[in-house]
Image (spheres, rainbow, N blue to C red):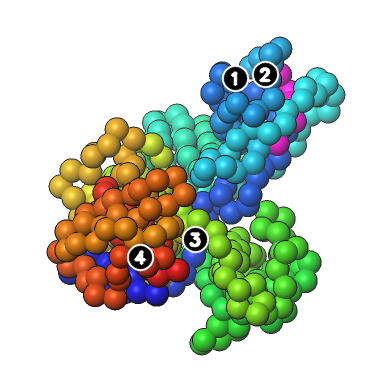
């Protein structure tokens, strides 16, 4: 495999993974129990006993919402599809007969979406939280919309506030599974062994076996497994899954040696810094950027005077696997299962090892080649 990178500003950084910034996407789905705060033909939003609101999209395969209304108590199940939660099941619950434990603290991390003298609102993936600000609440001076923070709220009132730092991220291990059980997984890498505990919210390890090659991510502090991706089965057979390419244009809200989060008009996009990632050493919170990520790992990063390119803040990203049918110094075309995909070739790319007829995987951002590998 030979990746093709773009531009002299892109260098290599260390591999790690996100733990706090995107917990809503760490698992494949979510079970919800609470009160419907909104119902429409395209989405439902459920507030749980901790005042966290989770939104699930409504698609053609979702159950009917006839008879449901805001204020109903429900139990729902949402599955992750296409990068978002989609409603899979929902049912009405009887009126609550016992009061909830409102004194329990709610801890939440995400991007600030609204801030006033009386309240603060945060967004993380498919979830939202709003806490009121009381006389004893910590000061929000210096906090800005778009910044990533951690909060604790009790009885719906803000009681703790801190910025998200690199210490809130985690570590990633890419290598061979040497031990796996219902409570932990150990991965042997080129440099060391890493063990993650398996707990509530961790991805399932049921299909992972000793000898499988995986990418595993553990949360700093608790060392809990928050990311698991099988790369090859025991014996070296590659796992053929489509690469997920994401593009984003907006303002940097979090940056560390392990991750970058960009706040766009359509929400927050977070990518880990890994092998083949451009350097983030000179990147700062508040910078306007465009970035492209493959399978959640940063691959393209460029400063931009105006990063408002598309209406929702996301750049166009495309992946395809198939046969290379056309190749020149300025463009190439891959014939895949759903037709031809063509991308321009940056001046800095070198395609000496690729020829028409090769079986390849290709990723493009904004119509320009991001990555090309032989399959």
- Residue 254, image x, y percentages: 37, 55
Residue under label 2, please give it: 65
User: Which numbered tag is attached to residue 357?
Assistant: 4
Q: Is residue 79 left or right of residue 134?
A: right
Give the answer, above or below, for where 200 lies relative to 145: below
User: Which numbered tag is attached to residue 338?
Assistant: none
Q: Residue at x 69, y 13 (%)?
A: 66
Disc nearer the start of the sequence (1/3): 3
Q: Tell me the SS state at disc 4.
A: loop
Q: Residue at x 17, y 67 (%)?
A: 348
2 and 1 marks in contact (CB < 8 Å): yes
Disc nearer the start of the sequence (4/1): 1
- Residue 25, image x, y percentages: 56, 49
Residue under label 3, please give it: 18
The dominant secondary structure in magenta is strand
Cα distance in 3D space between marks 2 and 4: 50 Å
Mark nearest the camera among 4 and 1 is 4
Q: Mark 3: few, some, or many residues within 10 Å (few <14, many ≥20)? A: many
Q: Tell me the SS state at disc 2.
A: loop
Residue under label 1, please give it: 39
Q: Residue at x 78, y 66 (%)?
A: 182
- Residue 157, image x, y percentages: 56, 36
Q: Tell me the SS state at disc 3.
A: loop
Q: Residue at x 73, y 23 (%)?
A: 73
Q: Which residues are magenta?
A: 71-77
């Amino acid at each position: 495999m030979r990746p093709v990178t773009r531009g002299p500003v892109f260098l290599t950084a260390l591999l790690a993974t996100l733990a706090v910034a995107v917990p809503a996407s760490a698992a494949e789905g979510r079970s919800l129990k609470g009160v419907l705060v909104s119902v429409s033909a395209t989405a439902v939003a459920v507030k749980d006993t901790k005042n966290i609101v989770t939104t699930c999209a409504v698609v053609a395969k979702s159950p009917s919402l006839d008879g449901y209304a805001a204020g109903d108590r429900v139990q729902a199940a949402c599955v992750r599809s296409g990068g978002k939660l989609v409603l899979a099941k929902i049912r009405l619950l009887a009126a609550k007969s016992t009061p909830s434990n409102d004194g329990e603290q709610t801890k939440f991390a995400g991007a600030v979406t609204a801030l006033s003298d009386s309240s603060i609102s945060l967004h993380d993936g498919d979830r939202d939280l709003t806490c009121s600000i009381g006389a004893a609440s910590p000061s929000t001076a210096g906090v800005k919309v778009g910044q990533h923070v951690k909060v604790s709220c009790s009885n719906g009132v803000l009681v703790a506030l801190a910025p998200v730092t690199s210490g809130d991220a985690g570590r990633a291990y890419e290598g061979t599974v040497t031990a796996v059980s219902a409570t932990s997984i150990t991965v042997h890498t080129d440099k060391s062994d890493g063990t993650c505990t398996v707990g509530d919210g961790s991805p399932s390890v049921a299909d992972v076996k000793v000898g499988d090659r995986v990418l595993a991510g553990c949360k700093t502090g608790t060392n809990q497994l928050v990311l698991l991706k099988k790369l090859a089965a025991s014996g070296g057979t590659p796992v053929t899954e489509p690469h997920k390419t994401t593009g984003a244009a907006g303002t940097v809200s979090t940056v560390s040696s392990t991750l970058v989060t960009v706040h766009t008009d359509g929400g927050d996009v977070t990518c880990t810094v890994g092998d083949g990632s451009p350097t983030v050493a000179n990147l700062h919170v508040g910078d306007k950027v465009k970035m492209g990520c493959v399978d959640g790992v940063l691959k393209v990063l460029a400063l931009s005077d105006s990063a408002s390119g598309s209406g929702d803040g996301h750049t166009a990203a495309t992946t395809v696997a198939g046969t290379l049918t056309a190749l020149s110094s300025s463009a190439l075309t891959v014939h895949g299962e759903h037709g031809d995909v063509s991308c321009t070739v940056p001046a800095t790319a070198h395609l000496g090892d690729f020829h028409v007829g090769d079986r390849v995987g290709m990723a493009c951002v904004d119509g320009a080649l991001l990555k090309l590998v032989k399959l």
